[in-house]
Image (tube, rainbow, N blue to C red):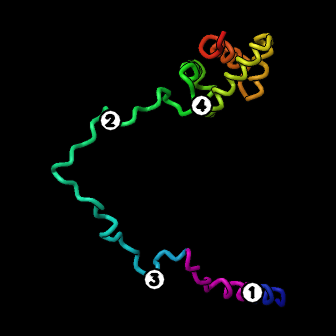
Amino acid sequence: MRRLGLVAGVAVAVMAGCASSPPVPQWKDPEPSGAVPAVSDALAAPLVEPTPDDDPVPLSATASPEPSGVAGVSVPGERFLAAVRGRLAGATVDLRNEEITRMGGQACASLAAGQPRRAVAAELAEYGLADADARELVALARSTLCES
């Protein structure tokens, strides 16, 4: 009986401690005490009122976009990227354009240095490409990116 009374006493003490929850920290409080700041009218209003005499800028006067769709990638690099994204879409889905063009440049440099295509493909497989995908990337680099 003593054990039962001791267990019951401990259980009551534990339950009494759990009965009151600690206060919610202010950063977690679902209902903040202050009002939410509203967007001021000064920010919402345009800074300069347009006049009827203002002509829109003609399209020919605007700066033309780079011939390359990707900043820092040459036109042969664009063709290479398009070919790789089209033929190896599943293998390169997690790669950035810069990484793909770097791999193509590496393939071209290795081929120009006289390395066999299989060795170049083995180097590219270190980027996580399957052997067949690496061989295809080397072939695409040779046909669209490499100088010779």
Label 2 to label 3: alpha-carbon separation? 53 Å
Q: Is residue 49 left or right of residue 92?
A: left
- Residue beneath disc 4: 97
User: Marks 2 and 1: which is nearer the front?
Assistant: 2
Which residue is labeled 1 in the image? 8
- Range covered by the magenta-colored residues: 10-27
Counting every numbered tag in the picture gives 4
Q: Residue type at mark 2?
A: Ala
Report the front residue among 81 and 111: 111
Between tags 3 and 1, which lies in front? 3
Secondary structure beneath label 4:
helix
Find the distance from the CA under tag 3 to the CA under tag 1.
Answer: 42 Å
Measured Cα–Cα span from mark 4 to mark 3? 48 Å
Quickly name the residue at label 2.
Answer: 61
Q: Quadrant of residue 42?
A: bottom left
Q: Identify the residue shown where x is 44% and y is 81%.
A: 34
Residue closer to the observer: 50 or 19: 50
Residue 83 rendering spot, x and y as whole percentages: 56, 18
